[in-house]
Structure formats: structure tokens, C-alpha cells
Amino acid sequence: EDKVVQSPLSLVVHEGDTVTLNCSYEVTNFRSLLWYKQEKKAPTFLFMLTSSGIEKKSGRLSSILDKKELFSILNITATQTGDSAVYLCAVEGGPGNYQLIWGAGTKLIIKP
Amino acid sequence: EPEVTQTPSHQVTQMGQEVILRCVPISNHLYFYWYRQILGQKVEFLVSFYNNEISEKSEIFDDQFSVERPDGSNFTLKIRSTKLEDSAMYFCASSERRGLTDTQYFGPGTRLTVL
């Protein structure tokens, strides 16, 4: 069965700390891995990763994919209270062509 | 910036009633999706739609569900006879190109409560 597993399930840190969120997957017909940030409602897109070893960066956020070990990490440096959210990992793949298989998310709380 | 919109933002219905959730995808997008998220659980894929037909659907998307693009702008999800377990946030998404070579943009969601 295709699955995406995120860890930890929740994380509480202080402002200014650096956090690393993990996503491992077992998905047939892997195409890409995506990271989303979900605050109150809809997930907002952060990164799409398709190639191993290439870091994607956006401000204080960065992410990298390891297709051999089947995982990705999302790093957030110098965290701010506005980074508090659920971070979702999703993998495009599976038996069909247009499906996303979602992880359960990591709930990140940044304390001032 | 163009965005996906959904209406209503919250709908409360009685078990057994039909509901229609509405979405207006981004205007030049060709691929449309519905997802749901039961409170506290992970986001689940329901269905994808392209060229006026279903491309993919999950096991959740049974005969009680249907999707339609009734005109050039709306994309609807109908639940024929709602059950308590249909209570969830329903997200619509759209993308410009095939599959996920392009980013899926999500709407704000409709919270469905079935009593």
C-alpha cells in the first residue's frame, strides 16, 4: 500500500530555533514530492521536489529529497511565530496518474 | 493574483440530504481536483477531472459522490445522501497542466457538517 509518513507528529520550539521536519514515503510510480503549509484552512504550496540531492530554498525554508532512501526533509531556520502551522508532505504517484498521497502532517508550534 | 474560490465556506446539513459544493478554479487551468480532510486527519484525495470527465478517483469516491463542470467556470462536488462520516473540510484545487508537473492551487475549503 502506498504511504507517506511524517515525523514528528508535533513539535514545539522557541522563536529563533531551527527545525527539521521529516517525510518518508513508499509510493509506486513516484513522480514528485511536495511540501505544503496549512494554517487555518487550505494548504499553501511550498516546494516541489523531483530530483535527488538538489536543495530547494525559499527564504528561511529549504528542502531536499533523497530518492534512494525515500525521504525528504524540510528545514526552517530562525523560526518565527508565523511559522506555526501544520506542514504537509504529499507524494505524486500511486496506481493512477494524478493522485497525491498525503502524510498526516507535522504540527509545528513556535513559542515567542 | 488569481485564486481558487469555494462556496459556501460552511454548510450544515441533515444526514441523508444532498449537498453540492461549488468551486471556481483559476480561469486558465484545465485540471481540477477535490480533496477532503476530516478533522484531525490527513488530507485525502477524492477525484481528479479533466476534459469534462473523471481522470482518477479514490476508493472514497463511491456512487454517492459525483462531480460536474456545469459551465465554463464552476466545478461542483455533489454528495447524494450525506452520512455523518462525510463531515469534513472539502478542498478544491486546480492546475494548469497535466498531473503535477504544475502546482496545484487550493481553494479555501468548505466545511461540511452532517448532523
Image (tube, coloured by chain):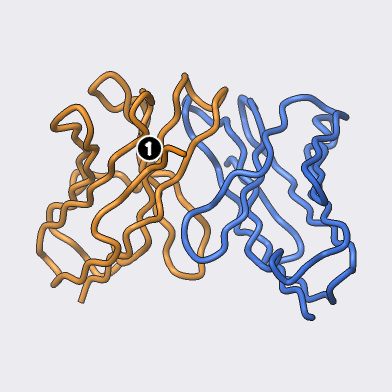
Residue at far left of view = B17
Quadrant of the rendered image containing residue A71: top right
Q: Is residue B11 left or right of residue B34?
A: left
Q: Which chain is blue?
A: A
Quadrant of the image containing the N terminus of chain A: top right
Q: Please tell me the colour of chain B.
A: orange
Report x, y in % for residue B23: 28, 44
| Along the line of sight, the residue nearer the viewer: A80 or A75 | A80
Q: Is residue B48 left or right of residue A37?
A: left
Report x, y in % for residue A38: 57, 58
Which residue does the numbered mark 1 point to in the structure image?
Answer: B33
Badge 1 crowding class, 10 Å Cα cut-off, few under 14, some 14 to 19, many 20 or more, is: many
Report x, y in % for residue B110: 32, 59
Q: Residue at x 87, y 57 (%)?
A: A77
Q: Is residue B84 left or right of residue A47?
A: left
Count numbered badges in the picture.
1
Kindly state the secondary structure of the residue where label 1 is placed: strand
The chain holding disc 1 is: B
Q: Residue at x 60, y 58 (%)?
A: A104
Above or below for B88 versus B3: below
Report x, y in % for residue A57: 81, 39
| Along the line of sight, the residue nearer the viewer: B8 or B12 | B8
Quadrant of the rendered image containing residue A111: bottom right
Q: Amino acid type of disc 1?
A: Tyr
Q: Is residue A7 left or right of residue A94?
A: right
